[in-house]
Image (cartoon, rainbow, N blue to C red):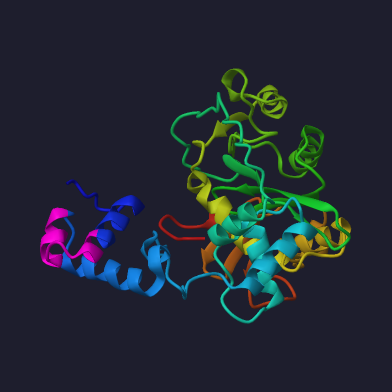
Amino acid sequence: MAWKKVLPMEERARFVLDVRKAEMPIAELCRRYEVSRKTGYKWIRRYRAEGLDGIRERSSRPLRCPHKTSFEWGGRIIVERLNHQRWGPKKIRELLIRKGWKGTVPAASTIGDILRRAGLVSSTKRRRLRGTYYSGPLTVARYPNHVWAVDYKGWFRTGDGRRCEPLTISDVYSRYVVEVRALGDQSYEGARGVLERVFEDYGLPEIIRSDNGGPFASRGAGGLSRLSVWWVLLGIRPEFITKGHPEQNGVHERMHLTLKREATIPASKSLRAQQRRFDKWRGRSRFIGEALKGVLVGIKPVEEGHNQVYFDSILLGDLYDIDYKGIRPAVGVHANDVKKGEKV
């Protein structure tokens, strides 16, 4: 007789009935039913104690699991989901951490499982994007305004419940944060308005690097969107990173982490208040001189925390991070007066 690894109920019942008949030794019955003597005696004990119910299939699930998420955490997760119906597991986990509950906050994957079991997550799969565009090897930035990076730093809600979509722009070479603008959406109109003001202040870059998301790119021909077509008309070359590889825009992404830590946690009470925090985060004003009001000057890095300021070829002085008042004036040095081999 072939006895499967997992005993069917019928076979177990036949086994214990044959034991009751006592027509052959238990060891021989175990060989006949192809089960170990240990297992055979286990079924006999259960049958004598509970009857046929004792030999039914039992769950192998442990009575206690130390890694199981507590009932209290499950309740907190569900409550936060109901309060923030558009939030995913990661944002809910961040909120729970900020609230300072005792104990270890469950992982985002665990929170997702709890939401699915509670029926709070749609099972509809996201439509897979097609036609995403990769523009080839990324350009190595050689000088300011050579390559800019643009992106949205994940949305959040301000204290009044409004959605905040920070649009960020940085110069890849100097790592200067050109703009951080608190917008209400990721629309073409909003992004273009910000870029127009930035172009007026800083000039046009040669290349703008972005991901494949809107409004920068599309699933259309060449991956171009209305915004990137506008760039091309201005003489700017769009450069798209590979889909799913944000590390290709790593300098900009690291800036996002700092921005999040210093200017968004906790969120401000309104978009206007949030913008004031973004403006403060970008830096502070430093006094150079009354005669240079409204004039562009150049900043040359010397070492960490120390920069020299030039107007045309004239050295104006030194700026140190530890000085909050302004420039340390220096005797003007003209580039033509510098001897060969000397550094200015």
Q: Is residue 152 visible?
A: yes
Q: Main secondary structure of the magenta part?
A: helix
Give the total number of marks visible in the rendering.
0
Look at 47% across and 37% down and name the residue there: 138
Comparing 169 with 328, the one in front is 169
Query: Which span of residues is magenta-colored?
Result: 18-32
Q: Is residue 273 magenta?
A: no
> Which x, y percent locates residue 7?
29, 54
> Which x, y percent locates residue 76?
70, 69
Look at 63% across and 82% down and name the residue there: 102
Q: In the picture provided, is 39 more to the left or to the right than 325? A: left
Residue farthest to the bottom, as pictured: 102
Comparing 310 with 29, the one in front is 29
Q: In the picture provided, is 229 more to the left or to the right than 196? A: left
> Which x, y percent locates residue 99?
71, 75
Look at 66% across and 50% down and name the residue there: 312
Look at 85% across and 53% down and name the residue there: 162
Residue 318 in which image quadrant? bottom right
> Which x, y percent locates residue 115?
64, 56
Where is 112 relative to 149, above or below?
below
Comparing 173 with 109, the one in front is 109
Q: Is residue 174 visible?
A: no
